[in-house]
Image (tube, grey):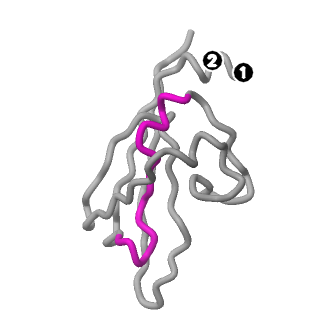
Amino acid sequence: SSSSLESSKVVGCWLAVDSSTLDNGCLRMMRGGHKHGPMMHFSVRDYQICDSEAPSIAKGDDIVAVPLEPGGLVLFDGMLPHGTPTNRSQSRRRRALQFHWTTRTE
């Protein structure tokens, strides 16, 4: 239920396997977006925080790029809107591992 999601504590981890750059679509995050609570997630694509369909609160928030070298990682609040745009480079892969941890509910 949405009430259990809102009350849970979630930590996200994004671990770069390859170099993650602006050119190959590194992770983007919405600065302060976790303060807005849960947001609709579109199931048809992964990256929507800059889309025109994004909630209106996203329009005034900063979108921050997070480039990482292989082995670099970022930990973040699971409610923080994040995503990776399409890799438009012709020669660079952008592989990563992503994990989310949450508290155990009884």
In the picture provided, is 48 more to the left or to the right than 87?
right
Disc ID at residue 91: none
Residue 18 is situated, as x and y percent measured from the top left of the image, at: 34, 71
SS at badge 1: loop
Per the image, is 92 magenta? no
Q: Vertical placement of 89 versus 25: above or below?
A: below
The one of 65 and 105 positioned closer to us in this rendering: 65
Q: Are marks 1 and 2 in contact (CB under 8 Å)?
A: yes
- Relative height, residue 50 to residue 9 (above, below): below
Q: How far apart in space, not on screen, are marks 1 and 2 (Cα)?
A: 6 Å
Which of the 4 image quadrants contains residue 99? top left
Q: Where are the magenta residues, as a range?
A: 21-36
Question: On the image, numbered disc 2 is attached to which residue?
Answer: 4
What residue sits 55% from the left and 72% below the top? 86
Residue 64 pos. (x, y %):
39, 54
Q: Quadrant of the C terminus?
A: top right
Q: Which amino acid lies under the numbered mark 2 shown in the image of this protein?
A: Ser
* 102 left or right of 76 in image: right
Would you name the residue on which mark 1 appears?
A: 1
Vertical order, 33 against 54 (above or below): above
Residue 38, position in %: x, y?
A: 60, 31
In this rendered view, identify the residue nearer to me: 70 or 59: 59
Residue 26: x percent and y percent?
A: 41, 65
